[in-house]
Amino acid sequence: MLTRPKAEYSYVEKLVAVRIATAINPTDRSWVLSQGRIAEEFGCGIRIVKSAVAKLKADGLIRATRVRVPGHNKLFNSYQLVPVELSGPF
């Protein structure tokens, strides 16, 4: 995915994918990290991160499920990486 041309994936989309990969929980291969926090870490707007996550989901590179995190009332997105060979057509 990282070697795909900019016409297919912007730098932000690639960075979001890398951030998901680096935050992955090795036990269940998923992560819970807010899009707002990613935007804050990257110094960009949350809409940009949401757009990148939406594209990664649409292309089948990540899956999202809603999970409850202990100590919080609201649900959070938990993302799982999908191996490129199992994702959408390229």
Image: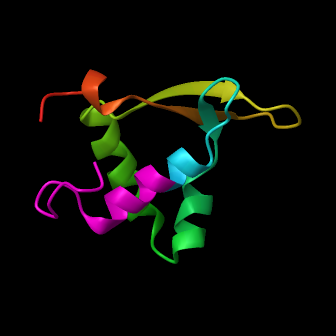
Relative image position of residue 19 (x, y in whole percent): 52, 55
Q: Is residue 4 left or right of residue 52?
A: left
Q: Is residue 16 left or right of residue 9?
A: right
Please report the residue visible at 46 percent of the width from the left and 54 percent of the height from the top.
Answer: 18
Q: Quadrant of residue 25?
A: top right
Please report the residue visible at 62 percent of the width from the left and 47 percent of the height from the top.
Answer: 23
* Magenta stretch contains residue 16: yes
* Magenta stretch contains residue 55: no
Q: Is residue 43 left or right of residue 55?
A: right
Location of the C terminus (image quadrant): top left
Relative image position of residue 45 (x, y in whole percent): 45, 71
Q: Is residue 9 left or right of residue 49?
A: left
Relative image position of residue 44 (x, y in whole percent): 46, 74
How many numbered callouts? 0
Relative image position of residue 9 (x, y in whole percent): 22, 56
Hey, which residue is sitting farthest bottom in the picture? 43
- Determine whether 84 is above or below 3 in the image: above
Q: Quadrant of residue 5?
A: bottom left
Please report the residue visible at 23 percent of the width from the left and 56 percent of the height from the top.
Answer: 3
Bounds of the magenta span?
1-18
